[in-house]
Image (cartoon, rainbow, N blue to C red):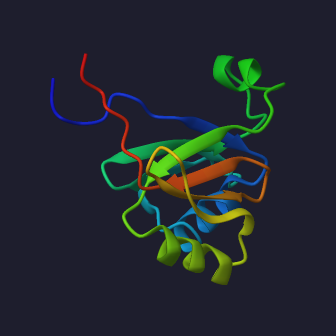
Amino acid sequence: MTDAPTLYPTLLYEDAKAAIGQLEEAFGFRRTAFYEADDGTVLHAEVACGNGAVMVGTKGRGGVFSEAMSGAGPAGVYVVVSDVDAHCARARRAGAEILMEPTDQDYGSRDYMARDLEGNVWSFGTYVPELSG
Protein backbone atom coordinates (compact mmCIF):
# COMPACT_ATOMS: atom_id res chain seq x y z
CA MET A 1 0.00 0.00 0.00
CA THR A 2 1.21 3.52 -0.71
CA ASP A 3 1.30 6.48 1.67
CA ALA A 4 -1.87 7.78 0.04
CA PRO A 5 -4.77 8.52 2.40
CA THR A 6 -7.15 5.60 2.89
CA LEU A 7 -10.13 7.63 4.07
CA TYR A 8 -12.11 9.89 1.71
CA PRO A 9 -15.29 11.57 2.93
CA THR A 10 -17.99 11.68 0.25
CA LEU A 11 -20.56 14.47 0.11
CA LEU A 12 -23.55 14.84 -2.18
CA TYR A 13 -24.93 18.30 -2.99
CA GLU A 14 -28.02 19.61 -4.75
CA ASP A 15 -25.69 21.96 -6.66
CA ALA A 16 -22.37 20.12 -6.74
CA LYS A 17 -20.79 22.62 -9.16
CA ALA A 18 -21.46 25.52 -6.76
CA ALA A 19 -20.19 23.43 -3.83
CA ILE A 20 -16.95 22.63 -5.67
CA GLY A 21 -16.55 26.31 -6.51
CA GLN A 22 -16.89 27.27 -2.86
CA LEU A 23 -14.51 24.54 -1.70
CA GLU A 24 -11.93 25.89 -4.16
CA GLU A 25 -12.43 29.61 -3.62
CA ALA A 26 -13.23 29.83 0.08
CA PHE A 27 -11.35 26.86 1.50
CA GLY A 28 -8.43 26.44 -0.90
CA PHE A 29 -9.20 22.96 -2.22
CA ARG A 30 -7.92 22.02 -5.68
CA ARG A 31 -9.95 20.03 -8.18
CA THR A 32 -8.24 16.75 -9.07
CA ALA A 33 -11.05 14.91 -10.88
CA PHE A 34 -14.34 15.98 -12.45
CA TYR A 35 -16.88 13.88 -14.37
CA GLU A 36 -20.29 15.11 -15.44
CA ALA A 37 -23.26 13.77 -17.35
CA ASP A 38 -24.47 15.32 -20.60
CA ASP A 39 -27.06 17.31 -18.61
CA GLY A 40 -24.36 18.89 -16.41
CA THR A 41 -24.99 16.70 -13.36
CA VAL A 42 -21.76 16.09 -11.46
CA LEU A 43 -21.36 12.31 -11.44
CA HIS A 44 -18.11 12.30 -9.46
CA ALA A 45 -15.51 14.88 -8.53
CA GLU A 46 -12.55 14.95 -6.21
CA VAL A 47 -11.15 18.01 -4.47
CA ALA A 48 -7.91 17.82 -2.53
CA CYS A 49 -6.38 19.71 0.35
CA GLY A 50 -2.90 18.74 1.50
CA ASN A 51 -2.64 14.97 1.19
CA GLY A 52 -6.38 14.35 1.69
CA ALA A 53 -9.37 14.59 -0.58
CA VAL A 54 -13.16 14.72 -0.55
CA MET A 55 -15.32 13.05 -3.17
CA VAL A 56 -18.28 15.13 -4.36
CA GLY A 57 -21.36 14.36 -6.44
CA THR A 58 -24.86 15.56 -7.19
CA LYS A 59 -27.75 14.43 -4.95
CA GLY A 60 -30.62 12.44 -6.42
CA ARG A 61 -28.93 11.12 -9.55
CA GLY A 62 -29.89 7.51 -8.82
CA GLY A 63 -27.87 4.48 -7.92
CA VAL A 64 -27.25 2.66 -4.66
CA PHE A 65 -25.05 5.31 -3.01
CA SER A 66 -27.35 8.19 -3.95
CA GLU A 67 -30.36 6.30 -2.62
CA ALA A 68 -28.56 5.36 0.61
CA MET A 69 -27.61 9.01 1.14
CA SER A 70 -31.04 10.42 0.26
CA GLY A 71 -32.07 11.05 3.87
CA ALA A 72 -28.63 12.04 5.13
CA GLY A 73 -28.23 15.37 6.82
CA PRO A 74 -25.25 17.67 6.83
CA ALA A 75 -21.86 16.16 7.53
CA GLY A 76 -18.88 17.46 9.45
CA VAL A 77 -15.37 17.28 8.01
CA TYR A 78 -12.11 18.27 9.75
CA VAL A 79 -9.16 19.52 7.69
CA VAL A 80 -5.64 20.20 8.98
CA VAL A 81 -4.24 23.60 7.95
CA SER A 82 -1.04 25.32 9.06
CA ASP A 83 -2.32 28.91 9.36
CA VAL A 84 -5.85 28.89 10.77
CA ASP A 85 -6.20 32.68 10.88
CA ALA A 86 -5.17 33.19 7.24
CA HIS A 87 -7.39 30.30 6.15
CA CYS A 88 -10.37 31.77 7.99
CA ALA A 89 -9.72 35.21 6.46
CA ARG A 90 -9.73 33.64 2.99
CA ALA A 91 -13.01 31.84 3.69
CA ARG A 92 -14.58 35.05 5.03
CA ARG A 93 -13.48 37.05 1.96
CA ALA A 94 -15.11 34.41 -0.24
CA GLY A 95 -18.39 34.76 1.68
CA ALA A 96 -18.33 31.53 3.69
CA GLU A 97 -20.46 31.50 6.83
CA ILE A 98 -18.07 31.44 9.79
CA LEU A 99 -19.59 29.54 12.72
CA MET A 100 -16.64 29.85 15.11
CA GLU A 101 -13.79 32.32 14.87
CA PRO A 102 -10.23 30.99 15.18
CA THR A 103 -9.99 29.75 18.76
CA ASP A 104 -7.22 28.13 20.80
CA GLN A 105 -8.45 24.78 22.13
CA ASP A 106 -7.52 23.16 25.48
CA TYR A 107 -5.89 20.25 23.63
CA GLY A 108 -3.42 22.55 21.84
CA SER A 109 -5.11 23.08 18.49
CA ARG A 110 -6.23 26.34 16.95
CA ASP A 111 -9.50 25.83 15.04
CA TYR A 112 -12.32 27.61 13.26
CA MET A 113 -15.59 26.35 11.80
CA ALA A 114 -17.51 27.31 8.68
CA ARG A 115 -20.68 26.11 6.98
CA ASP A 116 -20.80 25.45 3.25
CA LEU A 117 -23.60 26.40 0.87
CA GLU A 118 -25.65 23.28 1.70
CA GLY A 119 -25.14 23.07 5.45
CA ASN A 120 -22.08 20.86 5.89
CA VAL A 121 -19.80 21.98 8.71
CA TRP A 122 -16.11 22.29 7.91
CA SER A 123 -13.63 22.53 10.80
CA PHE A 124 -10.11 23.69 10.00
CA GLY A 125 -7.35 23.45 12.57
CA THR A 126 -3.78 22.69 13.49
CA TYR A 127 -4.49 19.43 15.36
CA VAL A 128 -3.12 16.35 13.58
CA PRO A 129 -4.61 13.09 14.90
CA GLU A 130 -2.11 10.39 15.90
CA LEU A 131 -2.77 7.37 13.69
CA SER A 132 -0.29 4.87 15.12
CA GLY A 133 -1.56 1.76 16.79
Seen as rendered, the residue at the extreme bottom is 93
Residue 69 in the image: above or below residue 127: above
* Residue at figure coordinates x 71%, y 26% from the top left: 66
- Given residues 129 and 30, the one toward you in this image is 129
* Residue at figure coordinates x 79%, y 34% from the top left: 60
Left or right of 92, for residue 97: right
**Image-quadrant location for residue 117:** bottom right
- Given residues 36 and 60, the one toward you in this image is 60
The quarter of the picture where the N terminus appears is top left
Residue 32 in the image: above or below residue 57: below
Instruction: Confirm whether residue 101 shows in the render.
Output: yes
- Given residues 69 and 121, the one toward you in this image is 121
Seen as rendered, the residue at the extreme front is 106
**Image-quadrant location for residue 70:** top right
Task: Give residue 90's position: percent from left, percent from top.
Answer: 56, 79
Task: Give residue 80's position: percent from left, percent from top.
Answer: 42, 52
Residue 123 in the image: above or below residue 25: above
Residue 22 in the image: above or below residue 1: below
Task: Give residue 46's position: percent from left, percent from top.
Answer: 46, 48
Instruction: Confirm whether residue 44 shows in the render.
Output: no
Seen as rendered, the residue at the extreme right is 71
Left or right of 127, for residue 95: right
- Given residues 58 and 11, the one toward you in this image is 11
Task: Give residue 87's position: percent from left, percent from top.
Answer: 50, 72
* Residue at figure coordinates x 68%, y 40% from the top left: 12
The quarter of the picture where the C terminus appears is top left
